[in-house]
Image (cartoon, rainbow, N blue to C red):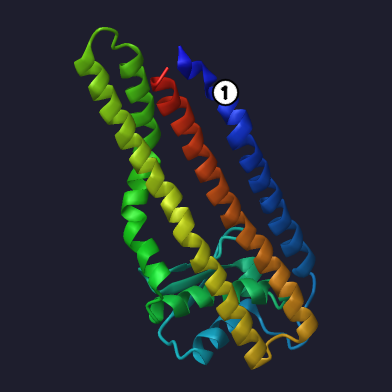
Amino acid sequence: MPYYYMDYWYLVLVVPAIAFALIAQGMVSGRFKKYSKVRSYRGVTGAQAAERVLQANGVYGVKIEKVRGNLTDHFDPRANVIRLSAGVHDSESVAAVGIAAHEAGHAVQHAQEYAPIKIRQSIIPVTQIGSTLSMPLILIGVIVMSGASGSPGSFDFGNILLNAGIILFTTVALFQVVTLPVEFNASRRAMDTIMETHILDEEELNGAKKVLWAAAMTYVAALAVSIAQLFRILMVTKGGSRR
């Protein structure tokens, strides 16, 4: 059967993307570890840096909370809360200031109704459905189609399931596409505000930029993995169905 070509496309398309993702994740960990040991000259903590970014952009009413975990920092728009890990919230390091300011950048985006972040939030429910149901639908569709010898109705039903799964998986990739401008813009807002308010000096700012750039590469890698998976699915299923 043509579907046995799946491993080939996985090796050609998905494995390199996964390798890129692992390298990007290693870069984040390495740079965070390096610059978390560099204390900022002005002794500003991550929590204080986030608060200053909010104030400098005229955003008030956003809570800043400390949470457990390592690099679990995020902005929750539903609760209007910036959650910072202990290694960022209380730390006076260059890495902590950069990460906290980045999350504050997301809060500023939300307050100013930045279009890409609104789009990302609006497609989250569909993306969650897609990440859960896409692969089961694709698998069931392939099984039904492969076993539908002499039964056009069964083949068509399998094809419907397959296409539905592909569409749902595409929403996952679309989410990753929309995420890129959101993340890069949050970092730009953070760095601009840090520079304008002199939270870090020039050398320290370069260190923070390196941490955030490495973090941004993880989102690029996530997009690469999603696109590679999508192309793999299309080549295996659609390419196979024409044989």
Residue 164: x percent and y percent?
30, 36
Q: Nearer the viewer, residue 197 or 6?
A: 6
Q: Which residue is mark 1?
A: 7
Looking at the image, residue 68 sits to the left or right of residue 234; the answer is right
Residue 77 in sight here:
no
**As displayed, is residue 2 above or below residue 219?**
above
Residue drawn at (77%, 69%) of the image: 35
Residue 233 in sight here:
yes
Number of marks in the rendered image: 1
Q: Quadrant of residue 17?
A: top right
Q: Secondary structure at mark 1?
A: helix
Seen as rendered, the residue at the extreme top is 150
Type of the residue with mark 1:
Asp
Residue drawn at (32%, 18%) of the image: 145
Looking at the image, residue 35 sits to the left or right of residue 154; the answer is right
Residue 34: x percent and y percent?
79, 65
Q: Nearer the viewer, residue 103 or 193?
A: 193
Locate the C terminus by quadrant. top left
Locate the N terminus by quadrant. top left
Q: Nearer the viewer, residue 115 or 195?
A: 115
